[in-house]
Image (tube, rainbow, N blue to C red):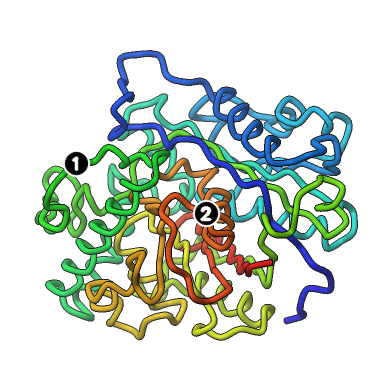
Amino acid sequence: MKKLHKKIYVAAGYYTVSFGSGRKEFNPRKPMPAFETYLAETAKGTLSQVKNPDAFDEGVIANFMAGRFIKQGNLAGFLPNMVPCLKHKPCIRVEGACGSGGLGLATGIKAVLAEQAESVFVAGFEVQNTVKAVYGADILAGAGYHGGERKAGHAFFFPGVFSDRAGAYYQKHGAELARRGMAKWFEIAITNARKNKRAQEFHNAEKDLFALGMMPPNPKAFVEHLNFFDCSKVSDGAASLVIASEEGLARLGVSEHDAVEVAGFASAEGNITEKPYDLTDLDTTAAAGQRALQMAGLRHGDIGTLELHDCFTITGLLALESLGFADRGTAAQFVLDGHTATDGKLPTNSSGGLVGYGHPTGASGVRQLVDLQLQLTGKAENQAPIKKDHGLMISMGGNDRTVTCVIVKRA
């Protein structure tokens, strides 16, 4: 794996509130913010951190299912509305299910590496509260093989898919410890979200979060091996940032002290028509993580903080093991021992993650990198005492099929 031949920076990150159930202002009986509102807010938030907003060369927008949730296509056409200088410049929409944001990041990085652009505006968004949750679950099922899996799948398709992964994990490593580890993941996620005013779970006032996470799954009402608290929520929101070379950063008028540098990145794709060979292994996540670490010339011990794609609590445990940050079968104890908490040895999802912040699918990957930028520049609302210079994020689409890993370091 070749190392980067030039410096690539990430700066000016911003994201909106993750809007949905759990927020005090959310009322499904009242009109909700339009997707244009989220796009305008995130663009304004990023541009406010740039001295010269006319210096962008390209634009990328990531989204999963706008065509079904809001009946809108041709999304690249909204980039010049968000960033006026992008009119008549190259703009593209990318899609990779829940990993769309990660693909947007990789697309922006590659544009700068290819020397077709010095600075790229990257945004991601999703609006999902336009339909009831059970109908939304069917829309999101498009992240799997619709023609081969959907008919026999659960009504709540992806909760069912990851319930099966949880069941396999219980069988291999023990259900009691796994359930406790998943409940602890939920507890830490909500604790972190309470310190992030834009998180969907910011207003969560439950006193005993661990007990809530330990509620037994009810297959008659939901799925067999997960409860509702194991799941990320239905969310609306957007995120954006700048990807730039040294020259691009200078043109934009952004200081390196406010940026982080890309140390390595990798995208990996699984075969969507094949079933996982091992339900307890995220092999595509592992491939992306391994290649990104190789590009960066780093080992696991060099990473000081993580932003993992915890669409479900079990996914967080599986990601820790598949990436090599915990041995097989030990992630639950690793979490129970507090290692992933903000003050732990490997702070993970200090933003709240997908379980705590929320999961506006097309925005999640971009939001994750924004949070790494904020953590490594010391500007995060829930700032972790990170003792190492590097952070790693995983953006995952579908059942571990479309994965992007990005590693950044303090500039």
Q: Amino acid at mark 1?
A: Ala
The first of marks 2 and 1 along the sequence is 1
Residue at the spot of label 2: 371
Residue type beneath disc 2? Asp
The quarter of the rendered structure image containing the N terminus is bottom right
Q: Are marks 2 and 1 in contact (CB under 8 Å)?
A: no
Identify the residue under disc 1. Answer: 205
Decide if residue 235 is on the left or right side of residue 10.
left
Q: Residues within 10 Å of mark 1 (few under 14, many from 20)?
A: few
Vertical placement of residue 135 versus 195, above or below = above
Q: Secondary structure at mark 1?
A: loop
Q: Position of residue 31 (x, y in %)?
A: 40, 14
Residue at 52% in and 25% down = 70
Position in image of residue 406 (x %, y %): 61, 65
- Residue at x 68% of width, y 52% of height: 11
Please give the name of the residue rendered at 36% of the width and 71% of the height, measured from the top-left corner: 318
Crowdedness of circle 2 by 10 Å Cα count: few (<14), some, many (20+)?
Answer: many
Left or right position of 409 against 314:
right
Residue 152 appears anywhere in the view: no
Q: Which mark is residue 224?
A: none
